[in-house]
Image (spheres, grey):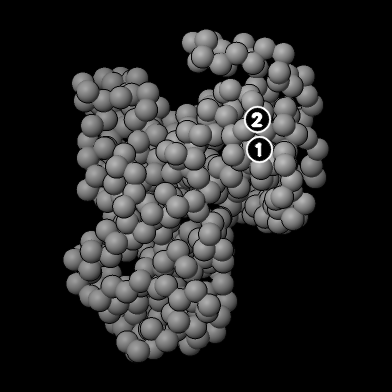
């Protein structure tokens, strides 16, 4: 079972959403409570946006605004990375090199175990390891101390976060660490300052004279202009025919809330964690959350689509196992939601690259299709277009 704070079911996620805007709602931590469910879309961004804007920002601005802002930032980072996938490829390449160089070095081990002697950093690291939760501001300061005070590779810090954060997202996490490091925008690092941390913690953490507060940003290759988003249909193709399967990744476990809800597949296949290139990608509590969420999804999908639901867990050759599974059901076509850039898209690319006699039909959620193309420049420019667009989408869908 997962941490009791985050039961990995859609029912609990909807309950959390229903509390937004209520008198008892925790407006400060509300977005953090929803984050893990958005990570695997036990609830969709549309549902979260609707809850955040329920009654309008005018009636409940302090409760609605933080979650709505979080949704926009998430769409922005994902869309930005979709247009520059080479950034993520470069991160993975550098991460692999840094792991070989640093994995057994004392400085790195001291940091990930929280034994640096920097009280704030060590406390945040313990909180990360035990709960998988850190506030937005704590993440920024942690990353800054990691990069500029401890002088550790930013890639290893980003990997540490992604493995342990309950709401970890490949795009948000990777690009946030690059942002703190001063890689984007170039030359504008975000430095942790002892006075701000002491004030934020109400005197709990005093780090005067112990932080690097005058560092320059890290250097990196120039950022290329965004390439156009690959266009994918928002609705299933009529070419699917009458016999086809539906493939579900743990990045989108609520197919019944998408345009796929009208499908009548002969079988549904849900990818298990073993299908990842590295099954050890996540820390135990995050893996437990995913596994519980998959179980919940299998029950819901079976009830909605009224067909057999199977979890794909083959760890040696998932592509071959998927082909054999659908061949047994005589299903030549497979439809799926396109994952965003990250480990689930990497998994999907490996599966679809293998010729196992299947024809694949990817679709993209309307939320993604409408918002991602606008994430080419700054967040402020994106928000100017995206905020009214989201409200329009909520009225139309």
Which residue is nearer to you in this view: 157 or 335?
A: 157
**Picture residue at 60% right of the left edge, 47% below the top:** 159
The residue that disc 1 covers is 110
Q: Secondary structure at mark 1?
A: helix
**Can you say whether 98 is above or below 244 in the image?**
above
Image point (22%, 68%), residue name: 302
Which residue is denoted by mark 2 in the rendering?
Answer: 116
User: Image quarter for residue 221?
Assistant: top right
* Relative image position of residue 301 (x, y in whole percent): 25, 65
Q: x and y percent of residue 218 in the render?
A: 78, 35
- Residue at 54 percent of width and 84 percent of height: 355
Indicate the secondary structure of the residue bearing disc 2. loop
Q: Is residue 313 above or below residue 87?
A: below
Residue contact at pointers 1 and 2, CB within 8 angstroms = yes
Q: Looking at the picture, does residue 244 appear above or below residue 385? A: below
Quick one: label 1 or label 2, which is nearer the N terminus? 1
Callout 1 environment at 10 Å: few (<14), some (14 to 19), or many (20+)? some
Judge whether residue 155 can be spotted in this image.
Answer: yes
């Amino acid at each position: 079972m997962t941490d009791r704070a985050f039961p990995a079911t859609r029912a609990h996620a909807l309950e959390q959403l229903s509390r937004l805007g209520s008198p008892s709602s925790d407006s400060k931590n509300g977005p953090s409570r929803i984050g893990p469910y958005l990570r695997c879309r036990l609830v969709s961004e549309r549902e979260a946006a609707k809850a955040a804007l329920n009654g309008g920002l005018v009636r409940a601005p302090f409760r609605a605004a933080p979650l709505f802002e979080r949704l926009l930032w998430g769409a922005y980072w994902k869309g930005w990375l979709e247009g520059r996938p080479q950034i993520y490829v470069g991160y993975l390449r550098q991460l692999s090199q840094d792991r070989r160089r640093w994995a057994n070095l004392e400085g790195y081990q001291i940091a990930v175990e929280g034994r640096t002697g920097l009280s704030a950093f060590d406390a945040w690291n313990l909180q990360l390891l035990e709960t998988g939760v850190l506030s937005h501001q704590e993440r920024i300061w942690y990353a800054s101390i990691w990069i500029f005070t401890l002088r550790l590779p930013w890639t290893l810090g980003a990997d540490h976060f992604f493995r342990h954060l309950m709401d970890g997202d490949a795009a948000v996490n990777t690009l946030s660490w690059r942002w703190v490091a001063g890689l984007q925008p170039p030359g504008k690092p975000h430095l942790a300052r002892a006075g701000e941390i002491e004030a934020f913690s109400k005197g709990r953490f005093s780090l005067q004279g112990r932080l690097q507060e005058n560092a320059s940003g890290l250097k990196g290759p120039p950022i290329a202009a965004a390439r156009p988003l690959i266009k994918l249909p928002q609705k299933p193709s009529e070419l699917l025919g009458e016999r086809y399967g539906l493939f579900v990744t743990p990045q989108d476990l609520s197919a019944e809330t998408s345009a796929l809800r009208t499908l009548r597949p002969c079988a549904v296949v849900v990818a298990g964690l073993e299908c990842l290139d590295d099954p050890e990608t996540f820390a135990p509590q995050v893996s437990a959350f995913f596994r519980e969420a998959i179980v919940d999804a299998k029950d819901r999908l079976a009830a909605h689509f009224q067909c057999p639901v199977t979890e794909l867990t083959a760890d040696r050759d998932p592509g071959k196992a998927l082909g054999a599974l659908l061949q047994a059901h005589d299903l030549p076509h497979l439809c799926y939601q396109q994952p965003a850039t990250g480990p689930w898209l990497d998994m999907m690319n490996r599966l679809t690259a293998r010729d196992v006699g299947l024809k694949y039909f990817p679709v993209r959620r309307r939320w993604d299709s409408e918002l991602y193309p606008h994430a080419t420049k700054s967040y402020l420019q994106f928000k100017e277009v995206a905020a009214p667009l989201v409200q329009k989408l909520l009225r139309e869908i």
